[in-house]
Image (tube, grey):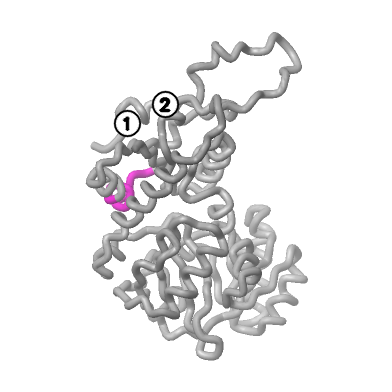
Amino acid sequence: MRIAMTYTRLRVEERMLIDAFVDLGVDVTPIDLRHVIFNPTQLGEWAQYDAVFDRSLSLTNTLTSVRILESLGVRCINPLHAIEACSDKLTTTLAMLRAGVPTPEVRVAVDTESGLQGIEQLGYPCVIKPTVGSWGRLVSRVNDRDAAEAILEHREVLGSAGHHVVYAQEHIDKPERDIRVFVVGGRAIAAIERRSEHWLTNTARGAVAAGLEVSDELADLSQRAVHAVGADIAAVDLLECPRQGLLVNEINHSMEFRNSTTTTGVEIHRLVAEHTVDIATNHASQPQPIGGYIQPADRGCGAPAERESEREVGSVGASLRGDVLT
């Protein structure tokens, strides 16, 4: 069994995963995506792997690599459709609504004035978020129209095109905590609570995590949420609403877990590695396309390149020549 683990920086989590794969007797190769040149028509050296486990910190790098590899028949963890659903908050919301999973109410607009009207439909306070982002960055609670106008104007003038989409979410008066549940292979394996006196309860913003028992309700809701986005492995963030009960807020397709392993006593990295091996084993048992390449279109100028001359494509660069752990 050979697994490639793509990354852009080897953090504690990636090192824990590598150790878990080694303990399982799996041949794991860390590959720095920054050194990779893809040929979208051929697998090249990627053909030697039974699966590719993405752990890149860059969403752009992740989407680019997984798109290409999946098109060539490589089983990626997580799959592209799950990454796309989890990484975009609007797409996550739509997936929850389709699946009947409770989630905070939102309003969406593509114009500042319409955005203000949507915010006022929700009422103050409410929360404005970028549809793509992590670690609580650029998430704002607005308490009145003046604040909403200021934030939306700054986003319109200074932000990227994506910031012109107004994604406004009802503010949930949670009890100074949110809950994160880790779901691996469709099963809720561990949970933590993240407490903070600040309304944002991301650990990246100073919240303190502690282990939490996975109740039947937590397990059921989290598993349904992950199933709705089609993820192999994910972390579900939930909010406790005094009126509506538990609500799924966001889903993380590439979760951090170093502190959660300590606080819960669950070896999350080992369970993730085991499930990855199960996926790779199952994929390897399925009939695969012959040849490992996509026939490119005829080129408009010059002679078409001979396939025999394209053996050295899809190289993963220095990563396969020993650019691994030190």
Give the residues in magenta. 9-16
Q: Mark 2 belongs to which amino acid? A: Gly
Query: Where 284 falls versus 258 (above or below)?
Result: above
Q: Residue 102 location in percent, x, y?
A: 57, 77
The residue beneath circle 2 is 317
Looking at the image, the residue that sits furthest to the bottom is 243
**Residue 70 in view in this figure:** yes
Q: Nearer the viewer, residue 42 or 169?
A: 42
Q: Residue at x 27, y 60 (%)?
A: 267
Q: Residue 176 location in percent, x, y?
A: 41, 82
The residue beneath circle 1 is 323
Please tell me in which quadrant of the rendered image residue 31 appears.
top left
Q: Nearer the viewer, residue 318 or 143?
A: 318
Q: Residue at x 60, y 79 (%)?
A: 170
Verify whether residue 149 appears in magenta: no
Whether residues under marks 1 and 2 lie with C-beta atoms below 8 angstroms apart, the answer is yes
Query: Where 317 falls versus 276 (above or below)?
Result: above
Secondary structure of the residue carrying tag 1 is loop
Between the C-alphas of marks 1 and 2, the distance is 9 Å
**Quadrant for the C terminus in the image:** top left
Q: Earlier in the sequence, mark 1 or mark 2?
A: 2
> Left of 238 or right of it: where is 109?
right
Q: Residue 318 location in percent, x, y?
A: 37, 26
Q: Mark 1 belongs to which amino acid? A: Asp
**Residue 130 in view in this figure:** no
Please tell me in which quadrant of the rendered image residue 18 appears.
top left
Q: Residue at x 48, y 50 (%)?
A: 78
Secondary structure of the residue carrying tag 2 is helix
